[in-house]
Image (tube, rainbow, N blue to C red):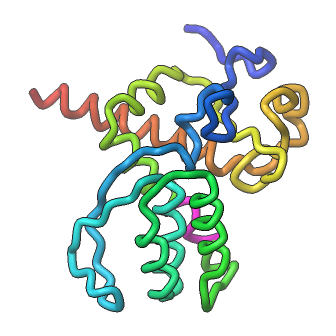
Amino acid sequence: MSTFNFDSEENYLFFWRPNADQPNAWASQWYPSSFTSTITFPALDLDASSVHFPTAEHWMAFQKALLFGDADVAQSVLNFSNTHPRTLATIKSLGRSVQNFDEDKWNAQRERIVLEGNLLKFGQNSELWELLDGTGDKILAEASPYDSIWGVGFTPDHAFENRADWGLNLLGQALMETRKVLREEKKRKQGSE
């Protein structure tokens, strides 16, 4: 039985933006990854409706709006169907403009919301699932120098050497949990066949 070596950079996978020049862009919330979910939200006349999300960022902003009952922001998010970086910046901004926002309530729900979105993203996109599954047991880390909540607060080039000063890396944590949950689901399905 081998032990995990936290001091070896090869045991980490860093990602950031969904740009062509960024390795592992598929792990980003902004990466084009169409999925659907059944949503009930009477204020938007959604009653067990199948709703399409072009990215996990759309999902997060929409769910944040639902959490705080902001139908206007929720509808605005649904009105944006492309995945251009400017559109995604607008989606992120919409998520930050949710009315009746309560930080304690958001902090209590944000990890669940992002986990659910990633379970949908990777559960409905087999190519993306293969990439996530192919990470083995690596520690996944969003290496954004601008985000120490969802990311580690350092660029991919500097993240490993600054591990002791990392931010929360909530997105990396959600991706690792997604990997674990989907592996368990696939194992159960194989066992029942």
- Please provide percent x and percent y for residue 132: 47, 29
Task: State yes or no: residue 173 in magenta.
Answer: no
Residue furthest toward the top? 1
Measured along the vertical axis of the image, is residue 58 above or below residue 171? below
Q: Is residue 125 left or right of residue 164?
A: left
- Please provide percent x and percent y for residue 163: 85, 33
- Please provide percent x and percent y for residue 41: 33, 83
Pick the quarter of the image with the N terminus: top right
* Image point (36%, 28%), residue name: 127
Residue furthest toward the left? 193
Measured along the vertical axis of the image, is residue 52 above or below residue 76? above
Magenta region, main secondary structure: helix
* Image point (62%, 48%), residue name: 171
Residue range corresponding to the magenta coloring: 107-113
* Image point (30%, 72%), residue name: 39
Asked whether 20 or 106 is in front, the reply is: 20
Give residue 193's quadrant in the image: top left
Q: Is residue 102 left or right of residue 187?
A: right
Task: State yes or no: residue 112 in magenta.
Answer: yes
* Image point (54%, 41%), residue name: 175
Asked whether 88 or 123 is in front, the reply is: 88
- Counting the numbered discs, the total is 0
Measured along the vertical axis of the image, is residue 150 above or below residue 80? above
- Please provide percent x and percent y for residue 80: 46, 66
Measured along the vertical axis of the image, is residue 147 above or below residue 2? below
